[in-house]
Amino acid sequence: MKRITVLLADDHTIVREGIRKLLELEKDLQIVGEAEDGRQAVALVKKLRPAVVLMDIAMPLLNGLEATRQIRKDVPDAKVLILSANSHAAFVKQVSELGAAGFLLKQSSSAVLATAIREVQKGNTFFSPAVVKHLPGRNPKSLDRGKQFKQKSNHLSSREVEVLQLIAEGQPNKQVAAELGVSFKTVDKHRQHLMGKLNIHDVAGLTRYAIAEGIIESNDRVPTG
């Protein structure tokens, strides 16, 4: 029996360990890799070519939504199944636009998770009932994952989204440059382009925008200065 290969992407080690142990009980599923941030997830998908990617949304360096966008562009055969504790409408809308195969809440049972993996691997969609109400037309079957993924609002490039996330996470330009492997001047240029495109002229504004667009999650109050 050919097993369904799965990649786990979640920044919490204990969560990945728990999911791995649950899925290892399923004879037709095989965990082939684990990623602790979105950037690592994209790299591993390109390398390992798993059939299904279990993707958390809130991850450092590169969030799950942008990672999904890059995977859908570079490895379109991989089915991305979002697994998140947050069913916020903004996240669900972006997931549907990006062409993910489904959205499953972390409150779901292991049996439901296994079923979701099998369904998306077949080419079907799978959305938790609490998520369906946020889908366009409230009909998950209306999603066409064969279409070209949509660009994010304001046409931000993938690199601009990465820079935006790191800035919104509180990283200084020097650290952003180190994380992305580019020069300080390049980061500053991206930052200026971001502010120009979005008509936002301070870090607090960029952070609020990143939260509103689902680029980062935050339970903290965003500064107003």
Image: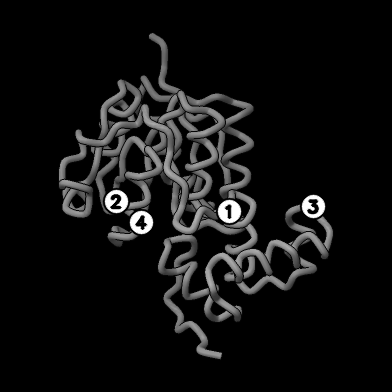
Image vertical order of residue 63 relative to residue 223, above or below? above
Mark earlier in primary sequence (3, 2): 2
**Residue indicated by mark 3:** 181
Q: Please, what secondary structure does the residue beneath circle 3 have?
A: loop
Whether label 4 touches label 2, CB < 8 Å: no
| Cα–Cα span, label 3 and label 4 | 28 Å
| Cα–Cα span, label 3 and label 1 | 14 Å
**Residue indicated by mark 4:** 91
Of residue 185 and residue 64, the one placed in the foreground of this image is 185
Q: Amino acid at mark 3?
A: Gly
Of residue 204 and residue 64, the one placed in the foreground of this image is 204
Q: Where does residue 93 sit, x and y in percent of width and height?
A: 31, 52
Q: Where does residue 202 sit, x and y in percent of width and height?
A: 60, 81
Of residue 120 and residue 189, the one placed in the foreground of this image is 189
Whether label 3 touches label 4, CB < 8 Å: no
| Cα–Cα span, label 3 and label 2 | 34 Å
Tell me the residue at 48%/60% (across/down). 215
Of residue 2 and residue 182, the one placed in the foreground of this image is 182
Image vertical order of residue 144 relative to residue 36, above or below? above
**Residue indicated by mark 2:** 105
**Residue indicated by mark 1:** 62
Q: Please, what secondary structure does the residue beneath circle 2 have?
A: strand
| Cα–Cα span, label 1 and label 2 | 20 Å
Mark earlier in primary sequence (4, 2): 4
